[in-house]
Image (tube, rainbow, N blue to C red):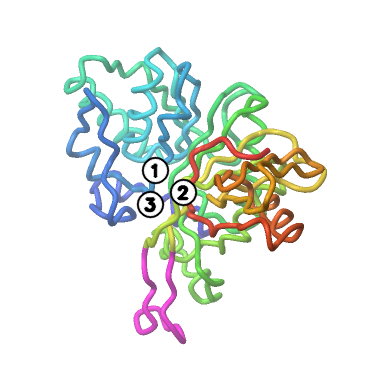
């Protein structure tokens, strides 16, 4: 049995018998006015963070959600796009599709504004998304892509890139590893299905996204997720997994490389009122300006005595230098 078949079997089991806290151990679903989440849907909150960022969801975007789970985030996206077929949820596991449909019917009884037609659940997988090229505004997935082996992760990212409109956004939440996960854990198919052994390091994860063509990435959140302790997992030392929420934009990659925003700022401390470099980055004296990591490195090296570069906050909400 392949690791993907093991994952399908595992999620078929938890679709029929919810395993509370399987992935999400700290966060609770976003509270939105007038949104009530059925208890069973909450119990099936198999995610490590969130992909639903309200500032991204104006103008009722068409959303493709990969791996429907219990339907919680599909319902949250529908809160912002209240029209039939606005959210397309793709799910390969039949039991999970059925569970999500049932949960959405429950949600319709508890939320007068919601109609189940707002979410269309389709049979399909992350590698062969059943929608046309450049047809959706947002592709989202929560705690799914980390299950994939690296080469399959690239296939899934390529599929997401294909279906996004130009300027569209890939919104993801996945575990990442603070150091490479040993082979004996990577090869444990059930641990991989449980989102505990397939995570890449931050640098590897971001580079995979860039390599398929996304020109700008913004980190929305980065926080502790799980600890793989040395005794249980046969490690030389404890290994921390983190949860990373990111938004990747389908825009061209600049000649000098992709822009990755992690919450860094540049602050000019020179004698003149403004600093303006050759690339057009304008800094007002004493006022922090959001910059991508690439620009931060360049400005910091250009005038280290006059430009302070602050550390990454790992919480960035848009705008910036590029």
Q: Along the horizontal axis of the image, is 109 left or right of 74?
A: left
Q: Which quadrant would residue 191 be assigned to in this image?
A: bottom left
Q: Check disc 2 and report the residue beneath it.
A: 315
Q: Check disc 3 and report the residue beneath it.
A: 48
User: Is the residue marked by circle 1 packed among few (<14), some (14-19), or many (20+) residues within 10 Å?
Assistant: many
**Location of residue 311 with respect to 213 vertically, above or below:** below
In magenta, the rendered stretch is 226-241
Q: Is residue 156 magenta?
A: no
* N-terminal label among 2 and 3: 3
Say if mark 1 contacts mark 2, CB within 8 Å.
no
- At x 39%, y 52%, the residue is 9
Between disc 1 and disc 2, the foreground one is 2
* N-terminal label among 1 and 2: 1
Say if mark 2 contacts mark 3, CB within 8 Å.
no
On-image quarter of the C terminus? top right
Instruction: Please name the predominant secondary structure of the magenta segment in the image.
Output: loop
- At x 74%, y 61%, the residue is 301
- At x 57%, y 33%, the residue is 169
């Amino acid at each position: 049995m392949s690791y993907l078949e093991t994952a399908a079997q595992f999620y078929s089991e938890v679709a029929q018998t919810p395993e509370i806290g399987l992935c999400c151990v700290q966060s609770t679903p976003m509270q939105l006015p007038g949104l009530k989440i059925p208890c069973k849907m909450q119990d099936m909150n198999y995610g490590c963070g969130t992909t639903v960022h309200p500032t991204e969801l104006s103008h009722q975007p068409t959303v493709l959600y990969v791996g429907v789970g219990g339907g919680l985030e599909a319902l949250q996206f529908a809160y912002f796009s209240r029209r039939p077929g606005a959210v397309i949820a793709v799910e390969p596991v039949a039991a999970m599709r059925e569970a999500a449909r049932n949960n959405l019917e429950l949600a319709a009884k508890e939320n007068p504004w919601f109609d189940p037609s707002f979410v269309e659940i389709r049979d399909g997988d992350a590698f062969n998304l059943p929608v046309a090229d450049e047809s959706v505004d947002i592709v989202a997935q929560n705690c799914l892509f980390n299950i994939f082996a690296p080469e399959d992760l690239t296939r899934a990212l390529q599929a997401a890139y294909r279906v996004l409109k130009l300027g569209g956004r890939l919104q993801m939440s996945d575990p990442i590893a603070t150091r490479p996960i040993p082979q004996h854990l990577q090869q444990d198919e059930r641990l991989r299905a449980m989102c505990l052994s397939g995570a890449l390091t931050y640098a590897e994860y971001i580079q995979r996204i860039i390599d398929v063509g996304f020109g700008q990435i913004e980190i929305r959140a980065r926080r502790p997720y799980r600890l793989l302790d040395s005794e249980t997992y046969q490690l030389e030392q404890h290994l921390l997994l983190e949860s990373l929420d990111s938004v990747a934009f389908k825009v061209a990659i600049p000649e000098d490389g992709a822009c990755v925003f992690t919450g860094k700022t540049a602050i000019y401390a020179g004698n003149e009122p403004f600093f303006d470099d050759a690339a057009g980055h304008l800094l007002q004296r004493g006022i922090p300006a959001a910059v991508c990591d690439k620009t931060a490195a360049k400005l910091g090296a250009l005038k280290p005595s006059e430009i302070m570069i602050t550390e990454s906050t790992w919480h960035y909400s848009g705008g910036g230098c590029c």
